[in-house]
Image (cartoon, coloured by chain):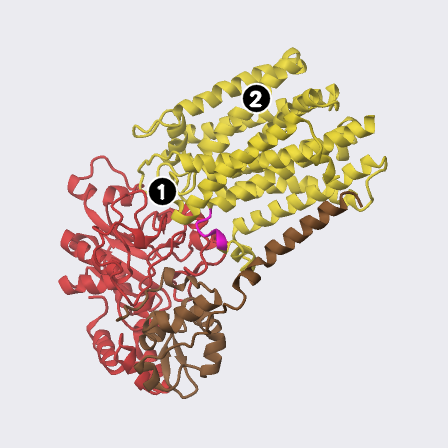
Amino acid sequence: MLDLALKGKRGYWGWLIFLLVIMGIGLGCYIYQFQEGLKITGMSRDVSWGFYIAQFTYLVGIAAGGVMVALPCYLHDYKAFGRITVLGEFLAIAAVVMCLLFIFVDLGNPVRIMNVIMYPTPNSILFWDMIVLNGYLFLNILIGWNVLSAERKGLHHPGWVTPLIYLSIPWAFSIHTVTAFLYAGLPGRHFWLTAIMAARFLSSAFAAGPALLILLCLIVRKVSKFDPGKEQIRTLGGIVAYAMIINVFFVLLEFFTAFYSQIPGHMHGLIFLFKGLDGHTQLVPWMWTATVFAALALILLIIPATRRKEDTLAVACVAVFISTWIDKGLGLVIAGFTPNPFNRVFDYWPTMPELFIAIGVWATGFFVLTILYKIVISVKEEIAA
Amino acid sequence: MGVDRRQFLKIAGVAALAGLGGKAAVDILAPGDVEASMKALPLTEGKRWAMVINMPELNDEIMNKCIAACHEEHNVPEFGDPKVEVKWLWKEDYHHSFPDHHNEYIDEKYEHKFLLLACNHCSNPPCCRVCPTQATWQREDGIVMMDWHRCIGCRFCMAACPYGSRSFNWGDPRKAPKDKNPDFPTNINYPTRSKGVVEKCTFCDERISKGQLPACVEAANKLKKNVLIFGDLADPDSNVRQVLSKNYTIRRKPDLGTEPNIFYIV
Amino acid sequence: MYDGGKIIIGLIIGIGFFTSPFFFNAGKAARRPEPELTQKAKDAKECVLETSYMKSSHMKLLDEWRQTFVRNDERYFTAKSGKVYYKSLQGTCLDCHSNKSRFCDQCHDYMGESPYCWECHIEPKESK
């Protein structure tokens, strides 16, 4: 089927070349980072994780979000989603590829990455994250590829794929739960030390993942003869609505615990994000932007008329994507390190090379996604013809 | 003084015998002798190493000497930039060292009294729990060790440490500004680190194994006795246990359950 | 076969490209270097293990040393002769073999090896 990715119109090739150029710039910056060390980033001994790990965290959510198509389809026999499950699986593949790349570019000693496998350490959550992410990647490649090639031949997918599909559903929950555990088990980092972290991660993932999928479906409909379907998009819209409501609810729970208990450590992170701490207000405009977008998304998603109208649903999905990205792909990691163990606040902001490397990784993900979606579209068009 | 007089004489005697620090003497001795002499050194037999820091006795001169001794011994470079600096042993005021002991009526002289901080060599270390490669782990004698051959630089341990005791090599330490490090590397018998690994105080494992006190303790002892006291917490008769039973001491963030092994006499 | 001629030409260019280093370097093989011993090393007569083993497998010993030294706190090595050595690349190995450039480097260069030991361990100062 891979040959289908080699035949495309000019727009397709233009887009791929555009992504390759961005990937090249990112790679160039990465080579610079590889030679000089992570000092070229904005990270410091006080904010020792930054933009890379934040992107990683956000993208694990996007990858897990794909399950919101597979779950109704395979567990609730919601047949309409059968048309787009492969879109969810291929989105998950691209997202996990980005996750693994973001972990890689964040390592101080990337050449030693195999030490994680050579010295397996079950008490380290990072070890389990490596296992669940690679496992999820593998499952989605197997499932997506086999389901699509069966569909191309007009057959049902082979029997051995079915148990893998059932396995992939709890596995999707596991990747984001384990990612939350990276943060939620660290003593002395009050902002992260919350039992609701995994639940929050999952709810924001199930809002952001399907929101991105809706946008991708709308793009697919525009650029190809394959229509993912009105009903499918409408159902996804409902899923995004519920997940976003739960996500915002969970965030508000954090506010209650912090501010009703009045424990300084629990309040500091939230104060830093929304009001600024000790005069450090860098993230405040971002977090209020996220709040406005979340409110806008909720209004558009809760009112049935705007949720069912594809134009306004698209606006809501963009708002969900931006809002959850600021929350998880920016605020979460930085606020976790603020204030530092000495109650001091240090600013962190990504540097240009750091941003270019991150954008390069995103471009790589979209490159993979474009090729995979091109194959899906070609197969679907072939079947329809 | 870190060890009592009797212990010190014992160490000094055996040390002279084994020519500690000079491996030439070790080479000359037959293997049995070496092992016997190593056994006889109390400093190599600790079960739970700990340090007591006598805060009222600390002054700038002592602290600076201790830090210099440590950083020279372990080739810790000076970057002059708080964002990337590497610290094994450093000065910090009471207010920031014990952020959970706030009291707005506390006297200035206590609030901003400086003290020495280092890795606490916790009995229940979160850093070791999170390390994905066992590049940092707890030895049987309680020392939280680092294996710089193995560290992949994921910095999970830095996120896990509630004491800010871990430093990352954001760049190559050998490229640290020359004007700030004219003699770097200061100790040719100790490695530097490569870029991309995490480092921290190891309670001078390299000195303890030779029967010597940690560099900071030795430096402090030269100026004043009983300011830094190093010994074995597992031994009820040890110097540290005696000091702990006679003085009121506090530890940093004890409610996190990490069981720090550096104690501060208030 | 479609485009058979083009494929064959492509294959020839490809094979030519990948084998070019062989043609390029043919007949120009560098002389195999012999590690040079310092006077101190000569006087010692023996290394921590047999010379033949050290020549072929010193990296294994060094790897074992660094593991046991750092991780197991086993800091001394007893040679067959009964002599005890402090396990230290910087302090023991290169104390004898202080001519790193002629003892270590020329052979590593010849073999195309670039061990990263020296990123951290400090090289002895050599008198030229």
Task: Kindly identify which residue carries mark 2.
Answer: A318
Describe the element under mark 1 as helix, strand or loop: loop
Mark 1 or mark 2, which is nearer the start of the sequence?
1
Residue at x 18%, y 54% (from the top left corner): B64
Find chain A in the image and tell me its colour: yellow
Which chain's colour is red?
B
Q: Nearer the viewer, residue A124 or B112?
A: A124
Q: Which residues are magenta?
A: A107-111
Which chain's colour is brown?
C
Position in image of residue A110 (x %, y %): 48, 51
Position in image of residue B44 (x %, y %): 33, 72
Q: Nearer the viewer, residue C97 or A110?
A: C97
Task: Kindly identify which residue carries mark 1.
Answer: A44
Predominant SS along the magenta part: loop
Residue at x 42%, y 44% (from the top left corner): A32
Q: Is residue B85 left or right of residue A150?
A: left
Describe the element under mark 2 as helix, strand or loop: helix
Q: The N terminus of chain A is located in which quarter?
A: top right
Instruction: Classify mark 1: residues with Cα within 10 Å, few (<14), some (14-19) or many (20+).
Output: many
Residue B210 appears in view = yes
Residue A302 appears in view = no
Position in image of residue B2 (x %, y %): 23, 66
Label 1 sits on what residue type? Answer: Ser
Residue at x 48%, y 37% (from the top left corner): A25
Write down the chain letter for disc 2. Answer: A
Q: Is residue B48 left or right of residue A200?
A: left
